[in-house]
């Protein structure tokens, strides 16, 4: 468990330098705790995503999703079938993760465009963000930035404090084909997903 004193930097979300600081930390290969439209997230660039597992105490078998700034950025990573496109058009930005085939067709990846301007601006600058909830694996994500950071199994380089995040984790949908199977219930219902797919 970390403590606030062990954290390198704590910056309020509304600080004019917050975005620059987050970009610098990520490009340096560090992990960052940041607010999202659901819960506090723990983010790193994909090449450094292994530290997310260590910080959470998370098994390697549990995949980490990515946050993107747009459907166009998602397309640089995954194939987006027609049904998934319709769902994304209707429900992104928002608390919906779409599990899609990677471009090489060898695996799948959870992708989400969050309804949080700071996160989208950051992804626009540095590319897709490997992100998971900022908590110990299997535990509830604390609602404040400092509590979320302190719950991890080590210190992070930067904590962006956006105030309390009282949301719940996103709905997760297997969108690799037209079936659109709900893998995890969340703020967006199965009915909303199906309705979006029919548009």
Image: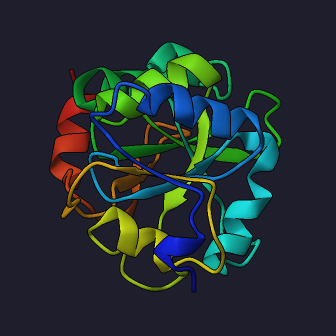
Q: Is 130 drawn above or below residue 139 in the view shown?
A: above
Instruction: Specify the color scheme.
Output: rainbow
- Quadrant containing the C terminus is top left
| Residue 152: % across, % down | 56, 77
In the image, what residue occupies the spot 18% across and 64% down?
166
Q: Position of residue 136 (x, y in %)?
A: 53, 81
Residue 89: percent from the left, percent from the top? Answer: 30, 20
Residue 69 is left or right of residue 28, and the answer is: left
Residue toward you, 136 or 112: 136
In the foreground, 172 or 126: 126
Residue at 44% x, 19% y is: 70
Horizontal placement of 59 versus 32: left or right? Answer: right
**Viewer-proximal residue among 21 and 44:** 21
Residue 77: image x %, image y %? 68, 27
Locate residue 54 relative to residue 19 in the image: left or right.
right
**Visible residue check, residue 84:** no
| Quarter location, residue 16 | top left
**What residue do we see at 50% from left, 29% from top?**
68
Q: Is residue 18 above or below residue 86?
A: below
Instruction: Please give the name of the residue rendered at 33% of the width and 55% of the height, measured from the top-left corner.
Output: 170
Can you see residue 62? Answer: yes
Left or right: residue 160 compared with residue 110: left
Looking at the image, the residue that sits furthest to the front is: 5
Q: Quadrant of the N terminus?
A: bottom right
């Amino acid at each position: 468990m970390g403590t606030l004193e062990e954290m390198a930097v704590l910056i309020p979300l509304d600080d004019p330098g917050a975005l620059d600081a987050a970009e610098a930390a990520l490009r340096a290969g560090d992990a960052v705790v940041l607010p999202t439209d659901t819960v506090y997230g723990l983010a790193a660039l994909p090449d450094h995503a292994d530290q997310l597992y260590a910080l959470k105490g998370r098994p390697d078998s549990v995949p980490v999703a990515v946050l993107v700034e747009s459907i166009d950025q998602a397309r640089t990573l995954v194939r987006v079938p027609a049904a998934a496109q319709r769902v994304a058009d209707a429900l992104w930005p928002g608390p919906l993760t779409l599990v899609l085939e990677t471009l090489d067709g060898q695996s799948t990846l959870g992708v989400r465009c969050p309804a949080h301007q700071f996160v989208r601006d950051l992804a626009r600058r540095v590319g897709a963000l490997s992100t998971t909830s900022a908590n110990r694996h299997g535990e509830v994500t604390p609602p404040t930035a400092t509590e979320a950071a302190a719950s991890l199994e080590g210190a992070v380089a930067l904590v962006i404090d956006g105030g309390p995040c009282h949301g719940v984790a996103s709905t997760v949908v297997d969108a690799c084909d037209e079936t659109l199977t709900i893998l995890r219930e969340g703020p967006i219902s199965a009915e909303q997903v199906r309705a979006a797919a029919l548009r």
